[in-house]
Amino acid sequence: MGQRVLRLSPADGDTGGATRVTGLYTFNGLDRIDIEEALAGDIVGLAGTDGVEIGDTLTDPRFPERLSGITVEEPTISVDFVVNDSPFSGRAGKYVTTRQLRDRLRRELERNVALRVEPTDRPDTFAVSGRGELHLTILMETMRREGYEFQVSRPRVITRQTGDGARLEPFEEVVAEVPSGVSGTVIDKLARRRGELVSMKPMGESGTTRLEFSVPARGLFGYRTEFLTDTKGDGILHHRFDRWDAWAGEIRGRGRGAMVADRAGKAVSFAIFGLQERGTMFVEPGLDCYGGMIVGKCARPGDMDVNISRTKKLTNMRAAAADENVRLEPPLRMTLEQALDFIDDDELIEITPDAIRLRKRELDQSRRRKAARTRRS
């Protein structure tokens, strides 16, 4: 500690001048420990070296030798982080304002080197780009546990244009080790997501098959949970960025509509019982809902507005069997990855410390219908 160091840039060798190290730290678990000196191979933190960028070299001024630079791969996926404006805003979170969301994302940039945060034409919306779905969902979950409330949009793949106008998108190299009996299912699912099987090798007598694919990055949205279900938890999935290549074509979306609450109120068993035959429910009895909130998934295309608070009409004449308890299917509880894969362009995920809700961007039912008519015309 106290040694003078020289900063060298990997691009042009520009020096930021010599500075003096005022603090030297090492790490033990989550604890930071002050030390006087560090040896080769130690991972340390330095204080007093402002302006250092990724890939810079800190060296002795007497021996200004620059190391080869480290290149951080560019983001491939982008989502919008939006200030929570739902009717339930502020119920559970401590940090809900635009300023608090902006400051938190800026702090994340200081240690999350692959992240990009850009303003949009809306002051309450920030475009956040990362290295993949997992990269962004880790940030979302971390912020949720810290007490932040916000909303996120459907992920968008980042594309490039070549000089001749061709559209390029990122492709991932996917390696899956699966029980041989389900390899056909995995191949079929990834083929629907525009994946191309590169190799297929049995792994000895273990009953496991190693599959290698080339898949568009957008084709992996929400796939990890589906993969674990198909392999009953026995599969191993790994993927990494491979290359930029020609646009692979459209990938079919969910193909089914959403059940959207048409009014505010608590979910009622009687209403859920009548709706569960028409799709899969996301809510349970007693849960507070608001108009425009997605409460289930339809069994057929097209959204359906529903009254999730509808109660049974009481009469003076009632058979004894009429008061029997209804039998409800357990609601589907989505993870963040599943929710990102499920939502459409006109929908958002509301993330709070105590809930993950799906909603329409436009909560007003009549405005949604008017917008739908405009799109069809």
Image (cartoon, grey):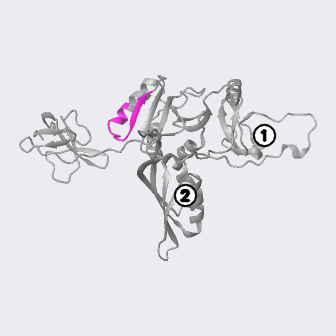
Seen in the picture, residue 76 relative to 85 is either above or below; the reply is below
Residue found at x 48% / y 45%: 133
The residue indicated by pointer 2 is 228
Horizontal relation, residue 124 to residue 26: left or right: right
Residue found at x 52% / y 53%: 224
Which of the two labelled residues, at mark 1 and mark 2, occupies the earlier sequence position?
2
Residue 116: say if magenta.
yes
Seen in the picture, residue 244 relative to 354 is either above or below; the reply is below
SS at badge 1:
helix
Picture quadrant of residue 239: bottom left
The residue indicated by pointer 1 is 270
Is residue 234 visible to the viewer in this orientation of the structure? yes
Instruction: Inspect the image, locate mark 1, and give the three-letter code of the amino acid beneath it.
Output: Phe
Q: Which quarter of the image is occupied by the N terminus?
A: top left
* Residue extending farthest right: 317
Front in this rendered view, residue 338 or 268:
338
Is residue 287 visible to the viewer in this orientation of the structure? no
Residue 306: say if magenta.
no
Tell me where residue 34 appears, x and y as whole percent.
Answer: 19, 43
Real-space CA distance between mark 1 and mark 2, rounded to the nearest whole angstrom:
34 Å
Q: Which residues are magenta?
A: 106-119
Tell me where residue 343 appears, x and y as whole percent.
Answer: 60, 39
Q: Are marks 1 and 2 in contact (CB under 8 Å)?
A: no
SS at badge 2:
helix
Q: Residues within 10 Å of mark 1 (few under 14, many from 20)?
A: some
Seen in the picture, residue 110 relative to 207 is either above or below; the reply is above
